[in-house]
Amino acid sequence: MKILSVFHPLFQVATFVVGVYNARMGITRKNFTYRRHFRFGMLYYGMAVLGLSGGMMITESLEEAGHEIELGSHLEIAFLMVFLFVLAGVLGLLVHYRPNLRKGLMPVHKYLNLATLLLFIYQAVTGFSGLLRFLLS
């Protein structure tokens, strides 16, 4: 049962890598096309939400098996991230389809996505520390 707990963090590391790649593409404009940025952005958001769902399922199955995992605010921050994903995604679409709003909304879109990447680092710290305590118990 403990081996299941390793899949979620590995998937989330892959999600973080996709997010960093997409952020780099958006910020530097290197190899940037809207279509590529949009696709990788949707992949990033989708993987993160899938990771949230998987993490919740793994935690629930471990708790049903009698294992208690202390993760602090890990779950609450994950839900905050989903909210930020939705907000950043809507702003990204507005930036694309309403060019007259680009100047004002582009920085907000960028900073929301960068905030999610910073929260991923926080999630890694809380998640890996909880996982380590669990695996060593």
Image (cartoon, rainbow, N blue to C red):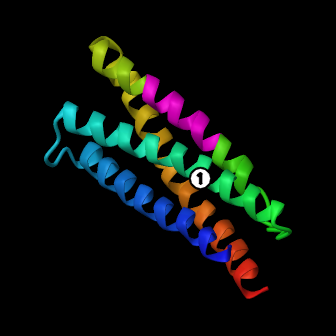
* Span highlighted in magenta in the image: 80-90
Work out whether 106 lies above or below 126. Answer: above
Quadrant assignment, res 101:
top left
- Which residue does the image show at 41% across and 39% down from the upper left? 110
User: Who is closer to the viewer here, 54 or 130?
Assistant: 54
Q: Say if 136 sits above or below 9 in the image.
A: below
Outermost bottom residue:
136
- What secondary structure is found at the residue carrying circle 1? helix
Q: Residue at x 56, y 62 (%)?
A: 8
In what quadrant of the picture does the N terminus appear?
Answer: bottom right
Query: Which secondary structure dominates the residues rendered in magenta?
Result: helix
Q: Is residue 133 left or right of residue 5?
A: right
Residue 95: x percent and y percent? 34, 21
x 21%, y 31%: residue = 34
Residue 41 image point, x, y percent: 35, 40
Which x, y percent locates residue 55? Answer: 63, 56
The stretch drawn in magenta includes residue 30: no
Q: According to the image, label 1 marks what residue?
A: 54
- Crowd class of label 1 (few under 14; some 14 to 19; many from 20; radius 10 Å): some
